[in-house]
Image: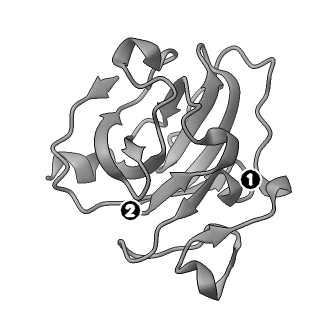
Amino acid sequence: MLFNIPFVCSATLLLAGSVTASPAIFARQGGHGGGGSGGGGQDPGNQGNITAKPTEIGTPQPNATTPEPPSGTPGGVLLCEQVEWSNCNYTVLQLDECYDLKEKWNRTISSLGPDNGTVLLTYEDVKCSGNGTGWLYPGSPDIRHDGWNDKISSIKAISDTSYHSH
């Protein structure tokens, strides 16, 4: 489900892989919220961005056609390169951290789904800036219909209770 957000909340979020962190998908932006760990090492010259080896990212599953039932994990998000939940990576984001999508994930997302209880905020520009919108469970199997296909450069997750309290 798509909804417009007046971006006045200062909440940000972080992604972690389905079992291990997937920081090569995105870089955490420092200075927002409570920090957190994304599973990658920190480069002192990188000003808080998480760095990771490319082998640490989750590999999209080309034959996946439907998402598994959501876990209800706070920050749980399914990001897919293709419509109808194809070529996906499930990850758990640390709430209240902003992440820039990196490499093949930047501006390539065509379907997405936050777990129940999570609001996924998506932005056209890095550092969770520029045009943005929010997604509630179950997300969308085809974000072309919402004008967001291949436009997402950064994301953040907040709990739906945090969103509704703003």
Residue 79 appears left or right of 63: left
Q: Extreme bottom residue here?
A: 44
Residue visible at 70% across and 14% down?
65
Residue visible at 15% across and 52% down?
165
Measured along the vertical axis of the image, is residue 125 above or below residue 143? below
The reply to whether residue 158 is in sight is: yes
Spot occupied by residue 45 in the image (x, y as percentages of width and height): 61, 85
Residue 55 appears left or right of 153: right
Q: Quadrant of the N terminus?
A: top left
Q: Of the residues under marks 2 and 1, which one precedes in the sequence?
A: 1
Spot occupied by residue 34 in the image (x, y as percentages of width and height): 40, 76
Label disc, if present, on residue 96 of the rendered structure: 2
Foreground of the two, 150 or 75: 150
Q: Kindly identify which residue carries mark 1.
A: 19
Q: Quadrant of residue 132?
A: top left
Foreground of the two, 115 or 131: 131
Mark 2 vs mark 1: in front: 2
| Residue type marked 2 | Asp
Measured along the vertical axis of the image, is residue 59 above or below residue 148? below
Label disc, if present, on residue 92 of the rendered structure: none
Question: Regarding mark 2 in the picture, which secondary structure is present there?
Answer: loop
Question: Regarding mark 1 in the picture, which secondary structure is present there?
Answer: loop
| Residue type marked 1 | Val
**Mark 1 burial class by Cα count in 10 Å: few <14, some 14-19, many 20+:** few
Residue visible at 16% across and 55% down?
8
Foreground of the two, 17 or 116: 17
Spot occupied by residue 25 in the image (x, y as percentages of width and height): 65, 50
Q: CA distance from mark 2 to mark 1?
A: 20 Å
Q: Extreme right residue here?
A: 55
Residue 11 appears left or right of 89: left
**Mark 2 burial class by Cα count in 10 Å: few <14, some 14-19, many 20+:** many
